[in-house]
Amino acid sequence: MLMKQKTSKSFSIFSTLMLLLLFLPSNVLAQSSAGSPDFIMSMVVATVIIVFGAIIFVTDSLLQLEGKRQLEGKDVKVDASLFPKNLNGNAADLPSYIPKDRYFKLRRGFDINLEGKPEEKIIDAPQVTRYSVSPMDFYGIAPIPKIVPEEGDAVLAGDELFFDKRNPEIKFVAPVSGEFIGLERAEKRAVKEVMILADKEIKFRELPHLDINVAERADIVDFLKKYGGWVHLRQRPFDSIPNPEDVPRDVFISTFDTAPLAPNLNFATHGEEAAFQAGIDMLNKLTDGTVFLGLDGRAKEVPSPVFTNAKNVEPYWFKGKHPAGNVGVQIHHIKPIKKGDTVWYLHPHDVIVLGRMLTERRYNTERLVALTGAEIKPNVYAMVRPGANMGELLSAVQFQEENVRLVSGDVLTGKKKSRDGFLGFFEDQVTVLLEGDYYEPFGWLLPQEVRPSISPTFPGFIFPDMEFRADTNAHGERRAFVVTGQYEEVLPMDIYPQHLMKAIITNDFERMEGLGIYEMSEEDIALCEFVCTSKMPLQQILREGLEIVNE
């Protein structure tokens, strides 16, 4: 992987030289005849630039190949390149609050720098009258769960809405109080939405007191299953709701998000120290292993005291481009998943929900949700609950364009929603994008605008801080699945994603296991899908593979 990274670097420099050649003063060439001294001099300069760039590119590649050959089979990292970088992740210039022995510097990845980042400002939350809990937000449950209330029944926040017929002891509960107004069904009568007409003032079901210091693990498991907390836990592999009979090897929590336009979790969790710590204490009772925290080591700001002051955790710091904030990437570097391992993971907001069940004795899912994207103004935060109606949630902002797509989540992994749709159960971000329903004539031949890309064909790498206006255009159709090496450039894991995808497509069970499918989730492969020249639906393919190995 290191070889490819450095080759790309030298290739980028070569491309820059070629761009300089293309932008030679046009008046020199235009005003010179074929035999004039000016024309001859221009051609000489152009030839020198091309030869010089080619020498740099070839020399750098040969140095890397020789370095790899000399060190083959040795556990040594040396950057044999004309453009060396420090390979030691424990950089000497680390901030004082980052311990060198718990620091990972990830070399691979790619940041998609888009317009519409959220300001650290909270607006008055709009009056959202309709909420929903969607069974489709949870992997591994039956498509038609058992609905408990009758249409028109009054429910409190924390009252049971439905349960999976295969695991009836795990309850899915209402996020708000109000009137149960029925279901929305999808294909084959699958339940898509379980909807509530919310009260203006939310009323909660009071939960029984649970002393976490003296409670046994079985008591905590029963408490979470009965009162709605269990569904906030997710396991790797498969991203499904954990089996209550299983004891996880470890629990992982990523405290920062590097996805495009992602909310700042330091800001979004401000003041939640007590609830977060209570949630951590509960998780420690549920595992015989360790609760790991992935902290932001990019030094843009000091992480929130909510995270740095947490006790009974083992923190690790990560620096790098997206997907450095993905919990799957952090698990891979801290303590990888092997066949037969089961680990759990949570978003910080879900840890806080579990903590509030102890500190407030109620099921309170309220959180700050970021309203992002260049097509709405202002880009701010609103305090709402998961499952909020998208149209009502976005009534607090102004749309800059009408032909837009609403996404529950980020642009890489989020789900398309209509204005009558609902915010996903695990989401804390809404993204509004231009609809890409247009064609770019001959875009494959001559790119007509600068856009985020790992390819040096687009000169965006010259302006790393440039923000781009996103749309949903894929700029091409699905093509032959060819080996390009692009996936490996952006995935900071010791996994060969293209080989894994091909193993899934060919239904090769043994190769899927051997190539690391148990460590992967859709969010980990999403950036590979973004850079894919073949336009392959990698997230969909990976989910099909996970379902195969989970049968």
Image (cartoon, rainbow, N blue to C red):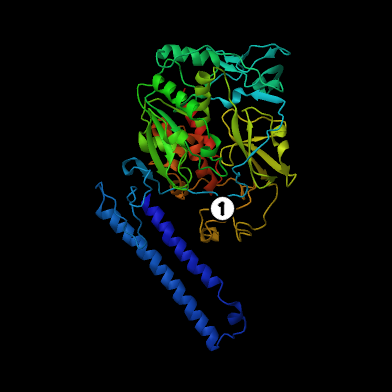
Residue 119 figure quarter: top right
Extreme residue toward the bottom, this view: 36
User: Does dot 1 land on a helix, a strand or a loop?
Assistant: loop
The image quadrant of residue 86 is bottom left
The residue lying at 54 percent from left, 84 percent from top is 39
Residue 545, image x, y percentages: 48, 31
Percent across and percent down for residue 376 are 69, 44
Q: Residue at x 51, y 56 (%)?
A: 455
Closer to the camera, 344 or 312?
312
Q: Amino acid at mark 1?
A: Pro
In the image, residue 529 lies at what x, y percent?
A: 53, 43
What is the total number of numbered labels drawn onto the structure image?
Answer: 1
Q: From the viewer's perspective, is residue 281 above or below residue 431?
A: above
**For mark 1, does the 10 Å Cα neighbourhood hold few (<14), some (14 to 19), or many (20 or more) residues?**
many
Q: Looking at the image, which residue sits at the far right?
A: 402
Quarter-wise, where is residue 411 in the image? top right
**Which residue is disc 1 drawn over?**
452
Residue 252 location (% of width, % of height): 42, 30
**Would residue 550 be found to the left or right of residue 371 on screen?**
left
State the residue in front, 90 or 366: 366
Left or right of 32 in this view: 58: left
The residue at 58%/34% (across/down) is 428
The reply to whether residue 164 is visible in this rendering is yes
Q: Is residue 138 left or right of residue 319?
A: right
Q: Is residue 70 left or right of residue 349?
A: left
Q: Is residue 446 above or below residue 99?
A: below
* Residue 512 shows in this picture: no
